[in-house]
Image (tube, rainbow, N blue to C red):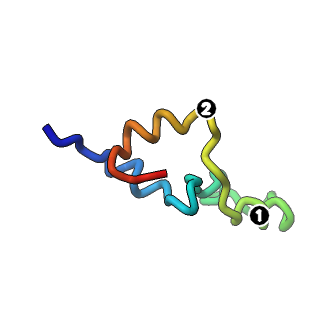
Amino acid sequence: MKLKTRKSALKRVKVKKNVLTRKKAYKSHLLSHKNSKRLRSLSCVAQVHKSDLTTFEKMLPYNNF
């Protein structure tokens, strides 16, 4: 049988040059008390942690990392 891709994981992660990238959390609301340096760092993309890579490999079976 073919394996199904988890669409929720596919929407949240992008594969770039053997690295999974994601967006950072805490930038959707309550932004008035966060300073601009913090907001700038939250705007940058981050890598998926190496302890979570095996989980994402199972959720995204046909995306080569």
Q: Are marks 1 and 2 in contact (CB under 8 Å)?
A: no
SS for dot 1: helix
Position of residue 3 measured from the top left corner of the image (x, y, whole percent): 23, 41
The residue depicted at 23 percent of the width and 44 percent of the height is: 4
What residue would you read off at disc 2? 51
Position of residue 65 measured from the top left corner of the image (x, y, whole percent): 49, 51
User: Is residue 58 placed above or below 36 in the rendered structure?
Assistant: above
SS for dot 2: loop
Q: Nearer the viewer, residue 43 or 49?
A: 49
Position of residue 8 measured from the top left corner of the image (x, y, whole percent): 37, 49
Query: In the rendered structure, which disc, 1 or 2, sits on the residue that comes first in sequence?
Result: 1
Name the image quarter holding the N terminus.
Answer: top left
Type of amino acid under label 2: Ser
The residue depicted at 64 percent of the width and 54 percent of the height is: 24
Position of residue 13 measured from the top left corner of the image (x, y, whole percent): 49, 55
Neighbourhood count class around disc 1 (C-alpha, 10 Å): few under 14, some 14–19, many 20 upward:
few
The residue depicted at 80 percent of the width and 58 percent of the height is: 33
Mark 1 vs mark 2: in front: 2
Q: Quadrant of residue 42?
A: bottom right
What residue would you read off at disc 1? 39
Q: Is residue 1 left or right of residue 54?
A: left
Q: CA distance from mark 1 to mark 2?
A: 26 Å
Q: Quadrant of residue 2?
A: top left
Type of amino acid under label 1: Leu
Looking at the rendered structure, the number of numbered marks drawn on it comes to 2
The residue depicted at 63 percent of the width and 37 percent of the height is: 50
Neighbourhood count class around disc 2 (C-alpha, 10 Å): few under 14, some 14–19, many 20 upward:
few
User: Is residue 53 placed above or below 33 in the rendered structure?
Assistant: above
